[in-house]
Amino acid sequence: METTVLQQEEQSQTQKSAAERLTVPCDEHQDVIANFEWLMSEYTGNIYISDMETYELLFVNKHACETLQGKAEEFVGRKCYEVIQGRNTPCPFCTNSLLKRDEAYEWEFDNPNLKKRFMIKNKIIDWQGRQARIELSHDMVSTEYKLAKKDRERDAIIRTIPGGFARVDARDMSTILWYGGGFLDLIGYTKEQFEDELHSQCTYVHPDDLARAVKVMQNAQSSSKDTVTECRVVTFQGEIKILTMTFSYVSGKDSWDGIPSFYSVGIDVTRDRIEQSRQRKALEEAYETSKLASEAKSNFLSSMSHDIRTPMNAIIGMATIAQANLAYPEKIDNCLTKIQLSSRHLLNLINEVLDMSKIESGKIDLTMENVDLSELVQNVYEMSKPLASQKNQELKIFVDHVSHEKVITDGDRLHQILMNLLSNAIKYTPEGGHIQFQIRETRGYKQAKGYYEFIFTDDGIGISEQFLPRLFEPFSREQDSRINKIQGTGLGLAITDNIVRMMNGTIEVHSQLNQGSQFIVTIPLEVVQEEEEKAEELIGCSVLVADDDEIVCENAVLLLGELGIIGKSASSGYEAVQKIQAAHENGQDFFAVILDWKMPGMDGLETIRIIRNQLWDKIPIIVISAYDLSEIEEDMIKAGVDAFISKPLFKSKILHVLELFCTAKIPKAAETGLELKAPDLCGRRILLAEDNELNREIAVELLSMHGLLVDTAENGAEAVQCFEASAPGYYTAVLMDIQMPVMDGYQAAAAIRQLPRQDAKTLPIIALSANVFVTDVKSAQAAGMNDHIAKPIDIDGLIAILRQYI
């Protein structure tokens, strides 16, 4: 049978090895030299031996004489470059410097003198006591040349195939008779390690896979079919590799040396299998995630159905009750109050679903603006305080080292983060519980950045360890009988987490079941660069802060210190009286006293009366409180209070109040007044463009309640016509719906702006729309509108915006 490529390679290696052994001369025995000369003479290729120092030819065989077309005695003793190359000087391409004793140097050369191309092998030998160069060559027309070329082509083909080759002895299924390609790299052994330590056995195969590999070879032998399997191998360094192996059986009868064997090709598939395992695991995780998400959405839809129907039922039910009790104003008022509360709750549910939808679709954007943190936090506190009061909870807010109150961020989204977390703390803390909200500023890595921590701590029901990893997943709520009746979508924390990450911030959660929770939000915010507020008149003055809360006292003293004011603290009304008296006796009176009105023992009101009646009636007394002071405000003023300040205490708030008592500032305050009168909207005419009759009726009624005169248009084209037909200045503003027939709000606003009259350029145009994405707001601005109000209309917000532009 015709031999295979692998068999040819094996035979070729065996023949090369024999030839190399024959070409190594031994000058110790003359008979060996004589035999060696005879072998060289009969060699079918060219053989030249030349002195490496003098280039003198020492031996030329018969075939070389035929190639040179002469006799040996004509060439021996002459220079090799003269005889072979036809040159007068040594060859510039001479390879003498590249030759070794233990390794043949192979190269090819086009000989212009002999007009043939030769494949050459050179090596260093000792010849008759001289260091000589032996050269074996074949020209391009010789059979040997063509066979060598084929060997090279075969080697090139073998090298292009990934993996390695081996011939396994079928008699013991273990001995490797021959190997090639990348076999050693494949199994992770050197030639010496494989032969000396493994003794050319296939024990590199993993012990657990060896029996299976032998069985696969036996199947190949019995079936005479090629087989494929995967096995693990253990490298010399102990690394595990996964190989795909093919086995092809050749019987002793068909083998060139009579040995039955398996010719095997191995390919390393370790990376592929690791990647497949990773992908399989990822798919399983994705499937589980998808399954959980599907279950969460199903639960969400079920929950939403309940949560939406609850306020809807209240709205419909209260409307029915109100209709049936038109003669009872108190009953109607009660129904309308509950309808309003239910409507706002329903709107909040819808907003959360829309927010989550925008986040998942990537449509949520941040609108950067200047934000006053003291105002924002105060607003959050004012909104949360009634919720905490309803459950008799203690809500405290602390300001810790906030040096920069004005920052650049998306104020609405930051407000949403704080409200979500604070309302959650209130919602999941039982009646009579304690909630703390702390704001802290730390120095940022960049000069223009400040790192702000918003810390929410409660002693509520806590979160189980099992649910914590899923806390921020959309639509997820913990299964707990204590919260089943608490309204919610399971979206608030998911929305909060996404917004925090959009702001390049982080959110940490620490919680224990039945112990309470702590949420820490850290957000880097760009600070507004402005001159630090300080009143020269206050620098060096001393102010006493009296509060039974040690943290409030510490923070207030720190804030006063940042303003250049010496702050002192007292933990009770009694201690405050003592310190005021001691300071007065030492001639170091306090510039002012900041006093909490709710303190144990001697409360704020009693402390004020003692200060005024027994100590000093001229010292400014400022009352701070987190509570509603309306009930006792009159008593406080009668007792001698000069000013009020609400918690949380920000530096700007303290400075503003203290400045009122600087003598240089008092006249200015009296001249300008403390309040600015809001613009009077009564009698101003508004053009309202709204295609929905019910929405139009509601808007007209609400605006009329504030004294505004309202003209209406049912589409954008009609609105443009109304304005165009009016006299300049007739309309004070235009309220424009967006989605209308004939001409939408964007087109109508652009058309008004393009009219050739002066007030068309300056007339306030405000969008009224249920489209509340940032892209919708930007589209309104691009069309020439001044502002954007979301439906349903918050009449107080709308009136505030109208006052801003009118």
Image (cartoon, rainbow, N blue to C red):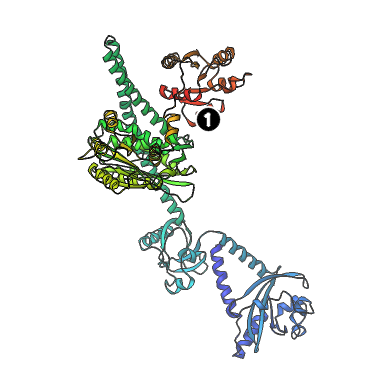
* Frontmost residue, 782 versus 231: 782
- Residue, disc 1: 778
Residue at figure coordinates x 55%, y 18% from the top left: 743
Measuring from the top left, give residue 715's x and y in whole percent: 52, 15
Could you say which quadrant of the image residue 596 lies in?
top left
* Frontmost residue, 314 versus 576: 576
* Frontmost residue, 269 versus 453: 453
Q: In this view, does 592 lie to the left or right of 514?
A: right
Name above or below for residue 112 compared with residue 582: below
Question: In the rendered structure, which amino acid carries the disc numbered 1?
Answer: Lys
Q: In this view, does 586 lie to the left or right of 187?
A: left
Could you say which quadrant of the image residue 135 lies in?
bottom right
Quadrant assignment for the N terminus? bottom right
Measuring from the top left, give residue 450's x and y in whole percent: 44, 46
Name above or below for residue 734 compared with residue 411: above
Measuring from the top left, give residue 172's x and y in whole percent: 40, 68
Name above or below for residue 567 compared with residue 180: above
Residue 474 seen from this side: no
